[in-house]
Image (cartoon, rainbow, N blue to C red):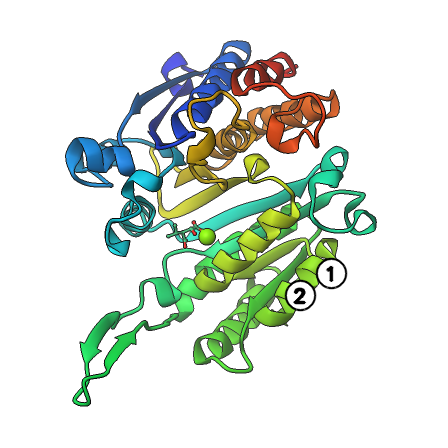
Amino acid sequence: MLRFMNTLCFATLPGDGIGPEVVDVSLRVLKALADKRNFNFETSYHDVGGIGIDNHESALPESTLIACRQSDAILFGSVGGPKWENLAPDKQPERAALLPLRREFELFANLRPGTLYPELSGISPLRSDIVKRGIDVLCVRELTGGIYFGKPKTRKILANKETLAIDTMTYQTKEIERIIEVAVQAASLRSGRLCSVDKANVLETSILWRQVVSEHVARIDPSIELSHMYVDNAAMQLVRDPNQFDVIVTENMFGDILSDELAVICGSLGMLASASLGADRNSMGLPFGLYEPAGGTAPDIAGKDVANPCAQILSAALMLRYSFGMEEEAETIESAVKQTIRAGFRTIDVAQGGKSIGTQEMGQAIIDHLG
Ligand code: IPM
Ligand code: MG
């Protein structure tokens, strides 16, 4: 293979709060792996979120968008913080950066693995008998449709002077089919079990969702063990017995809520990665994607070298897997994180009152476990 074929090109958007410091550690891990495995990467840094507002008067500056368009993937930190909390909701960094990015790159498939290593089962708020063997559930969330983006989305004053606000939930067959394809593929690489979550006892979109899911799964992979569950029941079952699920697939709003629930039962947001895959292919012929940790900016601990870098590092691993087709390298990072935890290294969020180390040190421990 020619040397230049081994160069990965992605845009780095560190954002706010702990974003820059955990992104920095994740790039150190990537660099260490690249040196071991004989590949290169090229990346450039761009403002997004609050720092975008401060430096360019936009949470998603045009220069950042251009850089993303020229890349094969986006490594994203996190956005938001108290400094920008008083802005109008649609100007707040989270919404004004993330939603336009999802729309611009049609990032329709959001993969949120909920993983709790058995060694950390004590950090879950769930009873120890429920989680003693850890948790391993993948939530596949549709990310560019439903009530987030449906039109009309508006507010009006009625004749009686009441204010009416409207959000609209829409789904088309093809939007459901494409997310199901991602979920089916993920399920077939795991246990083959897929649970589709909807509200088909009430919502028209959910009735269509359930029908399309059943027909499409039967068409593309009849070996998948498919089940359907109403969202209220799913929310309950997740805390009752999370491991009854393997892969969950659901629409945008339900996925937003269930993935937070899954995150909290896994104990620390500092451990959870995510991938948002686009409809378009990158220059490698693989999905363009945005990779970000689940945890947010944690402004209270920003700049103190205490944040857990694992979620960001695991997000970089997902980037290798999905946008660069580097399964082995992705697994190497994931297994290094697991071994590091197994060896007893902990940042404060997962230390359960025991000895803890800082962000940089945790990154170094993971690099030392790269094998
Ligand atoms: C998420 C977040 C976003 C969402 C917000 C910040 C717009 O909660 O990624 O889950 O609702 O999708
Ligand atoms: Mg959310």
- In the displayed structure, 81 sits above or below 172; it is above
Q: Is 144 displayed left or right of 36 in the figure?
A: left
Q: Is 337 displayed left or right of 26 in the figure?
A: right
Q: Secondary structure at mark 2?
A: helix
Considering the image in quadrants, where does the C terminus appear?
top right
Q: Secondary structure at mark 1?
A: helix
- On the image, the x and y values in percent for residue 45 come to 30, 24
Within 8 Å of ligand 2, the CB of disc 2?
Answer: no
Residue found farthest to the right: 129
Q: How many marks?
A: 2
- Crowding at dot 1, Cα within 10 Å, few <14 / some 14-19 / many 20+, comes out as few
Residue appearing at x 22%, y 73% in the figure = 155
Residue placed under numbered mark 2 in the picture: 236
Q: Using the numbered discs, state the Cα–Cα distance from disc 2 to disc 1 in whole angstroms.
A: 6 Å
- On the image, the x and y values in percent for residue 338 come to 68, 28
Q: Is residue 257 visible?
A: yes
Within 8 Å of ligand 2, the CB of disc 1?
Answer: no
- On the image, the x and y values in percent for residue 195 come to 63, 62
Q: Is 325 displayed left or right of 162 in the figure?
A: right
Disc assigned to residue 240: 1
Residue appearing at x 30%, y 31% in the figure = 71
Asked whether 2 or 13 is in front, the reply is 13
- In the displayed structure, 148 sits above or below 187; it is below
Q: Is residue 286 visible?
A: no
- Crowding at dot 2, Cα within 10 Å, few <14 / some 14-19 / many 20+, comes out as few
Residue found farthest to the top: 35
Q: Are marks 2 and 1 in contact (CB under 8 Å)?
A: yes
Disc assigned to residue 115: none
* Type of amino acid under label 2: Met
Asked whether 343 or 175 is in front, the reply is 343
